[in-house]
Image: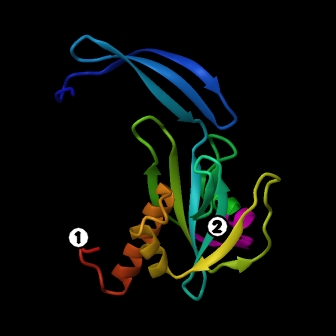
Amino acid sequence: MSKMGEQITRINRELVHSGTILDIYKDTMELPNGKTEEWDFVSHRKGAAAVVAVREDGKVLMVRQYRPSLERETLEIPAGARDSVTEDTKVTAARELEEETGYKSDKIGFLISLKTTVAFCDEFVDVYLARDLVKTEQHLDDAEDIVVEAWDLDDLCDLIYMGRIQDAKTVASILAYKNIVNINAGDYCPGRA
């Protein structure tokens, strides 16, 4: 481990694979002691946005979908990649909300910004909070099979603490929203679960 002030320097970056949404690189790094190491680096070129969508009854819209990396279904907040590196993530969040859930909102505000896997990936996800939802209809991509479910916030928190929701963006976003609810209810206490 390096001491503060000592530099780790990338001396080479080799593209190993260029995929649809990800590029995988092999980085050759020079450590402060002069030795070199090879590190993997995954670049998520466009970044992404997600949305915590809250109905008037307080229920949070969640999407259930199959994730091949886990070989099972997951329960997540709606999310998706930006169409381009210059697309405003708020635009992405609004689009993904309607595409995945069949709801839209003119009341979308910033909630939290995440770096999902800092050890080897530069992916970021900006998360928004949407209220005053208006029912439209889903517009799923051909490869998407998404079921929309409405959940009580406390039940989602229970699923997180039981380890049944593990998706990082969903965990962080639901807990950030829960914190806002607690503050507004006068029930906020730093450090309390």
Q: Position of residue 93 (x, y in %)?
A: 62, 60
Magenta highlight on residue 149:
no
* Number of residue marks: 2
Give the side of residue 4 with respect to residue 46, left or right: left
Tell me the kind of residue under disc 2.
Answer: Val
Magenta highlight on residue 101:
yes
Asked whether the residues under the numbered discs 2 and 1 touch, taking CB atoms below 8 Å apart as contact, a structural biologist would say no
- The residue beneath circle 1 is 191
Q: Residue furthest top?
A: 34
Q: Residue furthest left?
A: 3
- The residue beneath circle 2 is 63
Q: Going 30% across and 84% down the picture, which residue do you hit?
A: 187
Q: Quadrant of residue 134?
A: bottom right
Give the side of residue 147 with respect to residue 109, left or right: right
**10 Å crowding of disc 1: few (<14), some (14-19), many (20+):** few
Q: Quadrant of residue 18?
A: top right
* Residue 109, placed above or below residue 32: below
Give the side of residue 159 with respect to residue 88, left or right: left
Q: Which stretch appears magenta?
A: 97-108
